[in-house]
Amino acid sequence: MGSTAIVVEDLTKRYGDLVAVDRVSFTVDEGEVFALLGPNGAGKTTTVEMLECLRTPTSGNAYLKGFSIRDPSSVREIKRLIGVLPQEFNAVDNLTVHENVELAAAAKGAKNVREVLEQLGLWELRKRTFSKLSGGLKRRVGIAMALVGDPEIVFLDEPTTGLDPEARRETWLYVKQLKKSGVTVVITTHYMEEAERLSDRVAIIVRGRIAVMGEVRRLVVEYGGKTKLVFEELDGRAESLLRERGYELEVAPDGRTVVKVERHQEIYEVLSALRSLSLDVYPEIRQAGLEEVFLRVIGSRLSERGELV
Amino acid sequence: MTTTPTLVKLLFKSWMRSKVSLFFGFLFPVMLLLVFGSIFGGPSPPNYTLYVRNLDVDQHGTPGVLSEAFVRALNGSVFEVRLLKPGDPTPRGTGFAAVRVLTIPRGFTDNLLNTTMLNRIDVTTDTITSIIRMAGERIPEQTRDQIEASMEGLQTFKRFIVAEGVQITLEGSPDDRLLQPIEGIINVIASKFELGLLNASSAIEIRTVHAQVRQLRSVDYYLPGYIAAFIMTNGLIGVSSLVSDMHRRGVIKLLASTPVSKATWITSLIVVQTLASLLLTAVMVAVGWLVFRIVAIPDLYSLAVILLGTLAFTGFGVLIGGTVKEAEAVTALGNSISFPMMFLSGAFWPLELMPGFLQAAARYMPLYYFHVALRETLVAGSPETALFPALLVAALAVVGVTSAVLMTKWRDF
Ligand SMILES: Nc1ncnc2c1ncn2[C@@H]1O[C@H](COP(=O)(O)OP(=O)(O)OP(=O)(O)O)[C@@H](O)[C@H]1O
Ligand SMILES: [Mg+2]
């Protein structure tokens, strides 16, 4: 990776007694996709909005391409560098797609409206009134408004919350495109899958603090635990055979049997052992992911709606 | 540098596409003008108020006997006489009530008395001369000579009496359809007065003059009232809900994350509202002319008043929309400030139709000064009388725009 795009140092935001963001520090490299993953109210928005110079930190500091967010003269420079999709953003209802992107372009002094619309597949739809678009397209217009003006750093605050799975996957595609073009992206989400698929690095943030941070793969290896093979039903014969061979076995209350393996190679070993008993079974293979990391580190799960459960 | 024009263009498009702003910005005021203009459009209801300015007074201000008697005769007729002191200014029409001023000239009593005296002398000499002629030889020649000599004496005496005809002046609006009948009534009273009291005639002559200020018809009154009222609602209700909506959508957040400044944003809103105000004025003036033949071409003064009012109410709209959090509260606040003002400030109907305490209350409403200033400039063509209310609107504009700029947040929303 190249040089550093964002440096965050002990960034803190208090609202009265509430510490919304508590001494958060991290760095984001140029061209990297960095995800802030956390439940509702974790402080994701507060963190990114401090970086966007939209909220004043209580203490700490951050630098975007070397410009301090606390120095009024460099704030202007920062605003030239960034593109922002606010949380739950909705463009102006009675303007068209083109006019909305033009609005953002005017604010940034940008001229590449057409280019951005084409890039996001909106050019054909440019004359459509915003209010008449589907949820997915609306969000895409928001992303276009963030991207117009070729920002070097893009902040996307929960870009897929509330979208149907298809629209979500579509949005991911655009973020990947963005990464290819070398833009630095900071994305917030409470979807494990989103962080897992998109980000180079992820920071799990809970109650204003970063609990754990790093490359997704590395976190999974470190915290995720073993791969699980889940069998609908295994007879006593099979279970004792596997125990003999040294596998860790668990029988769930619903009668299913979970076999834990360390390496992928072991999956085949388990299956061929069962075949030798002429058992032709097909287990569900559960690979560890961010979900396990989250569970391990935070001690609870994250629901589809972003709540800790 | 193209930022502001583009923002203005897009915000204006959005404004013109919004059904609510079209309704309040154009349709509603035009409908009101058509409806109320047709119902109450004609001249004001008849009234017989007559201002009398009696200049026939001595150095202590005591009126001459005859002018006083004449005023009493007028008062005893259909007129409701209101006396003006010699130095009092001519009352101005406030909208509906026609103003007519009858001026009794200095020397009214003296001139009438002298005229009467001359008449009596003439009658006396004429009578005596005829009697002598009829009596003829029966009167002794000496006596006849004596009488003729005294008649000549009377004629000589007459030359010392200065008697001028008196001219009273009736001043009124050319639009006052009652002015002519009123002149006729005064004429009749004057003749009776002459005959009854003085046994003389043609001593009093009435001259009718048309005042410079035209009396307003109801529609003339409504036109600037509606324009002002809806420029106000455009700001207090329209702009406030627009700003609040932009906040909720995150559009303001997005704009604030770009290099665009708060000042540019507010300026764009003000320019858009100025365009909307001018458009509203144009539509209203056009409808007024087409339907009611009101000729009210906005001059520079009325345009300045429109600009000031737009600045003031747009400023307060931006303030409300930016500081009040809930959308419902924004609308509720905008409405609860606008509607009482619309109905009670005299923008919708003349204050004279309202009870005294409400008339007094109207003086505390910003809209009152806005519509008065606009009426004085747009319809009455009288920038002098618009000056004071216009200055108050200007002060309001300064306060409104300043507080909008100070209170609008461009970070830490
Ligand atoms: N302006 C504010 N005033 C007071 N408290 C605030 C303010 N903004 C945020 N908070 C509080 O700070 C905490 C963090 O909020 P933040 O919006 O940053 O969370 P988030 O991670 O973005 O959550 P979400 O998924 O709901 O968007 C929350 O407890 C929230 O209630
Ligand atoms: Mg958030």
Image (cartoon, rainbow, N blue to C red):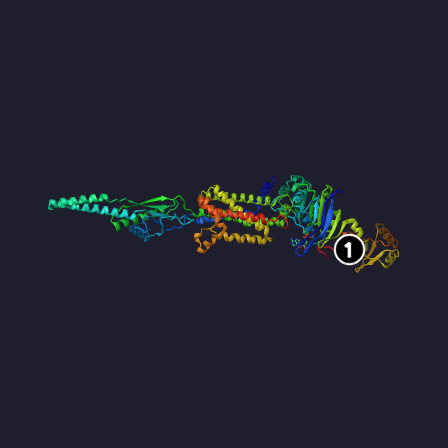
Q: Residue furthest front?
A: B59
Left or right of B196, for residue A59: right
| Residue B211 visible in the picture | yes
Amino acid type, callout 1: Arg
Q: Is residue B318 left or right of residue A183?
A: left
Q: Is mark 1 within 8 Å of ligand 1?
A: no
- What x and y, as percent, mark residue A269? 86, 52
Q: Position of residue B225 (x, y in %)?
A: 48, 48
**The N terminus of chain A lies in quadrant:** top right
- Element at badge 1? helix
The number of numbered discs placed on residues in the rendered structure image is 1
Residue A281, image x, y percentages: 83, 54
* Horizontal relation, residue A185 to residue B235: left or right: right
For the residue carrying disc 1, how many other residues have a C-alpha within 10 Å: few (<14), some (14-19), or many (20+)?
some
Q: Residue furthest bottom?
A: A253
Q: Is residue A169 visible?
A: no
Dividing the picture into quadrants, the one containing residue A125 is top right
Work out whether residue B401 or residue A200 is closer to the camera in this orientation and state it. Answer: B401
Q: Which chain letter goes with mark 1?
A: A
Residue designated by label 1: A296
* Quadrant assignment for the C terminus of chain A: bottom right
Residue B392 position in % (x across, y down):
49, 48
Q: Relative to the observer, which residue lies in front, B30 or A300?
A: A300
Looking at the picture, tell me which residue is in the foreground, B362 or B163: B163
